[in-house]
């Protein structure tokens, strides 16, 4: 463990505190990156940068060392603490020496403000910003030069959507005029398959980018207007909804608007009335009354219930008892009907005041947590035509306004409580997606939901990796991937100024779709496309020839690579680094002293 200086005593009024790890790694020629953040994405990003090269130096700027205490044990990392990211904080970082600055706080405004301050301190530095708001991200990208604007939530949301629908991880992106997505091989026509990504049947662990592409179960395919993957699952759900019987829908609507206890009491009273009416009709028929009919039995029963019966001591005991029961039931029936009507009106008005009408759901997806990730998952499921019910204990959560615009019902409450899940009609749901930031709440919600519906598909977000693996084995729950795990590689590649077009999650692995430019003197010059590939590491899916803006998606595999060519590849992180190294001439050896 690297030795560290003790933190400055509280109350000294120092705006910037420093901890130095791995002293003696002061090679000024090594790449230097600066990362500003306070959550696990910043930590994973730093790990990605350190793994890229053995001589990389990283400066971490955090608001409080307690946010990321793991930084104290990491070599080649200089940790700075600043309560505010402004010119004063950046002055102690020496941005002029940095190759790139990543601003990955979970606050769009704070990141943009810090970017403006950083450009004042170092006008030419490359910026990588984490921005959740899509429209804001597009505007920021136009304002700053040499800037990459990324959203970890948008990168991770498709994986949660796929898990919710029981499909392979969907990654859809547009590249050089084509839209591509991930699907199972049997879900797409063979002619649309671009390349094989993984064979999921190898000892329980997928074989990534197998040499024999024909055995890859998970493939990258071109979208041709035909439904596949997640779209197929969504259409199955819509078809299932269309097959519902109208009467069942009306019954569920009434059940949703009427209080459960009032409904039970009303049904009980109606049951008593029906039984008593039947007994009365039978006794009249036994007495030889030839004028008794079904209509007369109903008429006699309802009139006795609503207006009360005149006592008749000449009737037998059964008729007297049923008259008495019907009279008492009539006393309870009118108040119960009034209470049910008033309750339904109040519930409907409350739902309308909240911007939605709380209609019953079946085969829907319950999304718990409307933060940055939950809001994206909810929106994508809604766009696919899947019924969604959202749950969050904060009525002002980030995704609540979006849910109201989409007319998605929002239940305000603690998902760890069973009554909150019942309000979301978890018993008739097909999937529960729990993506809040509290591991305890997430796990409690998952277990409570399984207690209500044992066969419920549960997609659970847990931050502790070891804890997640144990929970998955013990409870057979689908553990979602970490958002930071999916997004960190793209942020790292953006900091190293690499053209990453998309990330593809496959099981616990992440593949990168990138362009690799070949320069004169590089090791790839003169080699064929087949020779440039690395089984299990990188696969070439397209070629943009030197001086051409269009991409050849079916280049001859024996085509010799020339200077200026750009390769479109699907690769693992290490495979991409090796391919980029081969595409460029080797760095000159340092001159001897």
Image (tube, rainbow, N blue to C red):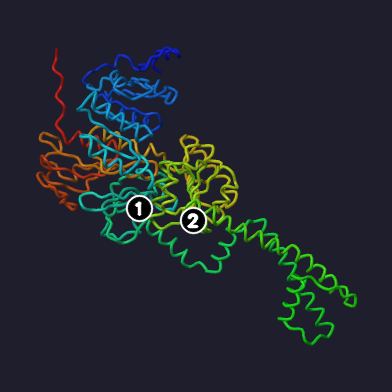
Occupied quadrant, residue 188: bottom left
The quarter of the image holding the N terminus is: top left
Q: Give x and y (percent) for residue 310.
A: 83, 73
Residue 501 image point, x, y percent: 26, 43
Residue at 79% across, 87% down: 290
Asked if residue 39 lies left or right of residue 283, the reply is left
Crowd band around label 1 with a 10 angstrom C-alpha radius: few (<14), some (14–19), many (20+): some
| CA distance separating discs 1 and 2 | 28 Å
Classify 10 Å Cα crowding around label 2: few (below 14), some (14-19), many (20 and above). Answer: many
Which label is found at residue 495?
A: none
Q: Looking at this view, is 80 or 544 the one in front?
A: 80
Give the number of marks.
2
Q: Which one is in front, 475 or 226?
A: 226
Nearer to me, 406 or 567: 406
Say the numbered circle drawn on residue 364: 2
Report which residue position mark 1 lands on. 217
Above-or-below relation of 523 to 213: above
Left or right: 143, with 183 as reference point: left
Task: In the displayed orientation, state which residue is furthest to the right.
Answer: 314
Q: Is 270 situated left or right of 36 in this image?
A: right
Label 2 element class: loop
Q: Quadrant of residue 234?
A: bottom left
The image position of residue 127, as x and y in percent, is 26, 32
Whole-percent x, y for residue 466 in the image: 48, 34
């Amino acid at each position: 463990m690297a030795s560290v200086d003790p933190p400055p005593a509280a109350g000294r009024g120092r705006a910037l505190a420093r901890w130095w790890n791995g002293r003696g790694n002061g090679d000024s020629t090594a790449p230097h990156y600066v990362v500003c953040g306070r959550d696990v994405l910043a930590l994973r990003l730093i790990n990605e940068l350190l793994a890229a090269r053995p001589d990389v130096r990283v400066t971490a700027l955090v608001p409080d060392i307690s946010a990321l205490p793991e930084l104290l044990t990491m070599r080649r990392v200089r940790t700075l603490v600043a309560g505010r990211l402004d010119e004063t904080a950046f002055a102690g970082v020496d941005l002029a020496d940095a190759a790139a600055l990543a601003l990955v706080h979970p606050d769009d405004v704070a990141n943009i403000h810090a970017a403006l301050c950083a450009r004042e301190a170092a006008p030419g530095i490359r910026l990588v910003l984490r921005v959740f708001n899509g429209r804001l991200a597009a505007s920021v990208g136009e304002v700053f030069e040499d800037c990459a604007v990324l959203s970890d939530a948008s990168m991770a949301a498709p994986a949660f959507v796929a898990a919710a629908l029981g499909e392979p991880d969907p990654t859809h992106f547009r590249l050089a005029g084509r839209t591509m997505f991930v699907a199972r091989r049997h879900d797409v026509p063979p002619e649309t398959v671009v390349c094989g990504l993984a064979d999921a049947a190898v000892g329980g662990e997928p074989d990534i980018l197998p040499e024999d592409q024909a055995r890859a179960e998970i493939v990258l395919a071109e979208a041709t207007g035909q439904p596949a993957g997640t779209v197929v699952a969504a259409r199955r759900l819509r078809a299932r909804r269309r097959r519902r019987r109208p009467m069942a829908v009306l019954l569920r609507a009434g059940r949703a608007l009427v209080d459960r206890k009032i409904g039970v009491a009303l049904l009980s009273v109606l049951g008593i009335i029906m039984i008593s009416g039947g007994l009365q009709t039978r006794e009249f028929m036994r007495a030889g009354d030839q004028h008794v009919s079904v209509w007369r039995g109903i008429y006699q029963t309802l009139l006795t219930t609503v207006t009360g019966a005149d006592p008749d001591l000449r009737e037998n005991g059964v008729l007297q008892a049923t008259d008495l029961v019907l009279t008492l039931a009539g006393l309870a029936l009118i108040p119960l009907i009034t209470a049910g009507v008033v309750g339904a009106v109040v519930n409907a008005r409350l739902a309308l005041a909240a911007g939605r009408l709380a209609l019953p759901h079946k085969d829907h997806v319950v999304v718990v947590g409307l933060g940055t990730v939950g809001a994206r998952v909810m929106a994508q499921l809604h766009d696919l035509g899947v019924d969604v019910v959202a749950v969050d204990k904060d009525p002002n959560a980030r995704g609540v306004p979006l849910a109201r615009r989409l007319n998605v019902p929002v239940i305000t409450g603690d998902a760890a409580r069973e009554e909150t899940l019942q309000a979301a009609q978890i018993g008739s749901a097909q999937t529960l997606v729990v993506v809040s930031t509290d591991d305890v709440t997430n796990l409690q919600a998952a277990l409570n939901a399984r207690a209500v519906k044992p066969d419920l598909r549960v997609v659970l977000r847990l931050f502790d990796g070891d804890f997640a693996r144990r929970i998955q084995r013990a409870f057979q729950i689908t553990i979602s991937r970490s958002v930071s795990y999916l997004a960190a590689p793209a942020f790292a590649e953006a900091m190293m100024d690499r053209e990453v077009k998309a990330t593809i999650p496959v099981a616990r692995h992440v593949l990168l779709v990138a362009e690799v430019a070949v320069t004169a003197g590089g090791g790839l010059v003169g080699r064929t496309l087949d020779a440039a590939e690395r089984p299990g590491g990188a696969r070439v899916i397209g070629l943009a020839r030197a001086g051409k803006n269009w991409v050849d998606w079916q280049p001859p595999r024996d085509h010799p690579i020339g200077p200026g060519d750009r390769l479109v590849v699907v690769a693992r992180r290490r495979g991409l680094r090796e391919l980029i190294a081969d595409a460029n001439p080797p760095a000159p050896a340092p001159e001897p002293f």
